[in-house]
Image (cartoon, helix red, strand yellow):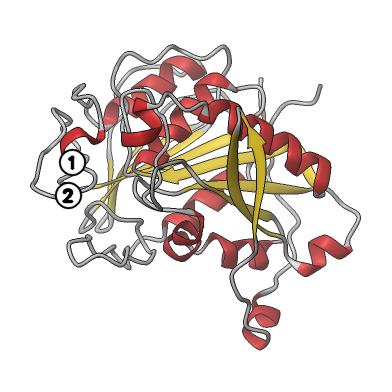
């Protein structure tokens, strides 16, 4: 059984960040499966100067995004400096800078080329533990849209390496294999999301939109709440549909799960296909995220309570 961490000692770097503006990190890379795979690492100065092992949060960009876009969109670089963890922003693959992840039925280049993104992220975890003061028991994964789909796939494939996940405006397709072990999950979807509708269904189509058309193979999406049901079954939780908790900002389904295997699903009001509390992508047609719900803060609060069991 996984253990819950009631507290996580962190160091606040907000004042330092305000006094010393921080530019984007340098791109790093590793070769996996014959491909040069890029990633960005944000390591707060006090973490680099210290001797203690710290958590790492891997943040996956959405379809058509990249690592720098994920930094701007989520603000997880700022959160890392405030809380004293390492934030990592890997990149998918593509023929252009419109990069995607191979989440099985989605998306685009990574899907059609059958790119081994699970292997890449596994190799990236090895590199982080080898080169940074990363605690291997506290590696977390979050992502948006196609990155959220990939987050699910990684947890299914590596439940023994991922301490918790936080998919945002993502979905499952219904044919995923139940993982060999539990993974705590905080799941966030937008009530006004037209691209990943809460009710599920066939992928929407629109003229000229990157995320539409042939971006995935046409397999219908399960309703967003199926994500909660999937991890409920994987984590040994009780019941199937917990009563919803209604607030002016969101609806929450908090599943009855064993300690250390919690599952929470949020449906955020006034939020479409966007990172709640984050920055909208630089596209005219992009949804504007709500400012009433901060997904980054919620995800980190959830992550900080969980770690892999001692071995």
Task: Answer above or below: position of 43 versus 176.
Answer: below
Residue 10 location, quadrant = bottom right
Task: Answer above or below: position of 212 versus 178.
Answer: below
Which SS class for mark 2? loop
**Image marks 2 and 1: residues in contact by CB distance under 8 Å:** yes
Across and down, in percent, residue 46 comes to 81, 67
Is residue 275 visible in this depiction of the protein? yes
In depth, the one of 274 and 36 nearer the eye is: 36
Across and down, in percent, residue 32 comes to 63, 32
Left or right of 82 on screen, residue 110: left
Across and down, in percent, residue 31 comes to 66, 37
In depth, the one of 245 and 165 nearer the eye is: 165
**Position of the N terminus by quadrant:** top right
Residue 286 location, quadrant = bottom left
Q: Which residue is mark 1?
A: 212
Which SS class for mark 1? loop
Task: Answer above or below: position of 23 versus 297.
Answer: below
Which numbered tag is attached to residue 209? 2
Left or right of 20 on screen, residue 66: left
In depth, the one of 191 and 127 nearer the eye is: 127
Across and down, in percent, residue 198 comes to 20, 37
Residue name at image x 21 percent, y 21 percent: 219
Is residue 4 visible in this depiction of the protein? no
């Amino acid at each position: 059984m996984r253990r819950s961490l009631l507290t996580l000692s962190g160091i606040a770097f907000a004042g330092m960040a305000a006094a010393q503006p921080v530019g984007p990190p340098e791109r790093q890379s590793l070769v996996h499966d014959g491909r040069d795979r890029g990633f960005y690492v944000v390591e707060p100065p006090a973490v680099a100067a210290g001797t203690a092992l710290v958590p790492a949060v891997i943040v996956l960009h959405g379809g058509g995004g990249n690592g720098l876009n994920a930094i701007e969109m989520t603000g997880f670089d700022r959160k890392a400096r405030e809380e004293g963890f390492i934030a990592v922003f890997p990149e998918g693959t593509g023929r252009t800078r419109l990069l995607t992840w191979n989440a099985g039925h989605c998306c685009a280049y990574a899907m059609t080329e059958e790119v081994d993104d699970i292997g890449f992220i596994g190799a990236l975890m090895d590199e982080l533990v080898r080169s940074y003061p990363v605690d291997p028991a506290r590696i977390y994964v979050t992502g948006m849209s196609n990155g959220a789909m990939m987050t699910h796939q990684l947890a299914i494939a590596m439940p023994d390496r991922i301490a918790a996940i936080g998919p945002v405006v993502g979905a499952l397709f219904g044919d995923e294999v139940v993982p060999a072990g539990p993974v705590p999950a905080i799941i966030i979807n937008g009530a006004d999301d037209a691209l990943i509708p809460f009710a599920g269904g066939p992928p929407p189509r629109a003229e000229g939109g990157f995320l539409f058309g042939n971006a995935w193979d046409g397999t219908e999406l399960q309703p967003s709440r199926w994500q909660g049901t999937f991890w409920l079954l994987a984590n040994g939780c009780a019941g199937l549909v917990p009563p919803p908790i209604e607030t002016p900002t969101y609806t929450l389904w908090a599943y009855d799960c064993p300690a250390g295997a919690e599952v929470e699903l949020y449906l955020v009001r006034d939020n479409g296909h966007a990172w709640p509390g984050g920055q909208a992508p630089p596209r005219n047609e992009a949804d504007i995220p709500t400012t009433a719900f901060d997904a980054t803060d919620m995800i980190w609060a959830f992550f900080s309570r969980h770690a892999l069991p001692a071995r």
